[in-house]
Amino acid sequence: MRILGLDIGDRTIGVALSDPLGFTAQGVTTIKRRGMEKDIDELRSVCEKYGVELIVSGLPKNMNGTLGPQSEKVMDFCKRIEKLIKLPVKMWDERLTTVAANRAMLEGDLSRAKRKKIVDKMAAVYILQGYLDSISK
């Protein structure tokens, strides 16, 4: 079963995909946000191309575990995904995933420009890998 991981932001959506056995997550793309309909169409295309059966979206919680305005935006977008793409969406705590992605890229000595281009995709990988690790236990 293929699972799609998403890091949903205001300007971009990082996209990651599991391997067919659900062990590892790989970065696929970063979608530039261009409006609800176009964003959903791009996600639908990725889901169809890879035969996705489940979507895991990062849920941006505050450090104390509460939900803020960005969480509401993400949950609303995920409700639309479920309705329009007709796939189940699970929410996954994404606290510190962007920090971890940036740290890994710094250790890999990527330039600031390269990091900026792929940080959302890498955060999606961390979100999805966290989910995959939790269900394999």
Image (cartoon, rainbow, N blue to C red):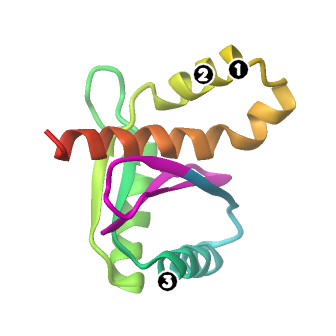
Query: Do the numbered discs 2 and 1 sit on residues whose CB atoms are within 8 Å?
Result: yes
Residue at the image position 54 percent from the left and 22 percent from the top: 99
Q: Is residue 13 positioned above or below 109 on the image?
A: below
The stretch drawn in magenta includes residue 6:
yes
Circle 2 residues within 10 Å: few <14, some 14–19, many ≥20: some
Residue on which disc 3 sits: 48
Three-letter residue code for mark 1? Gly
Could you say which is closer to the camera, residue 129 or residue 56?
Answer: 129
State the separation of the CA atoms marked 2 and 1: 6 Å
Residue at the image position 26 percent from the left and 27 percent from the top: 65
Residue on which disc 2 sits: 104
Residue 3 image offset from top left, x and y in percent: 37, 63
Three-letter residue code for mark 3? Glu
Q: Secondary structure at mark 2?
A: helix
Magenta part, dominant SS: strand
Q: Is residue 84 positioned above or below 7 on the image?
A: below
User: Hey, which quadrant is residue 98 in on the image?
Assistant: top right
Q: How many callouts does the rendering have? A: 3
Residue on which disc 1 sits: 108
Three-letter residue code for mark 2? Ala
Residue 89 image offset from top left, x and y in percent: 30, 65
Circle 3 residues within 10 Å: few <14, some 14–19, many ≥20: few
Could you say which is closer to the camera, residue 35 or residue 117?
Answer: 117
Residue at the image position 42 percent from the left and 58 percent from the top: 19
Circle 1 residues within 10 Å: few <14, some 14–19, many ≥20: few
Q: Nearer the viewer, mark 3 or mark 1?
A: 1
Q: Where does the N terminus fall, quadrant-wise? A: bottom left
Q: Is residue 55 positioned above or below 70 on the image?
A: below
State the separation of the CA atoms marked 3 and 2: 30 Å
Q: Which of the marked residues, 3 or 2, is nearer the chain's N terminus? A: 3
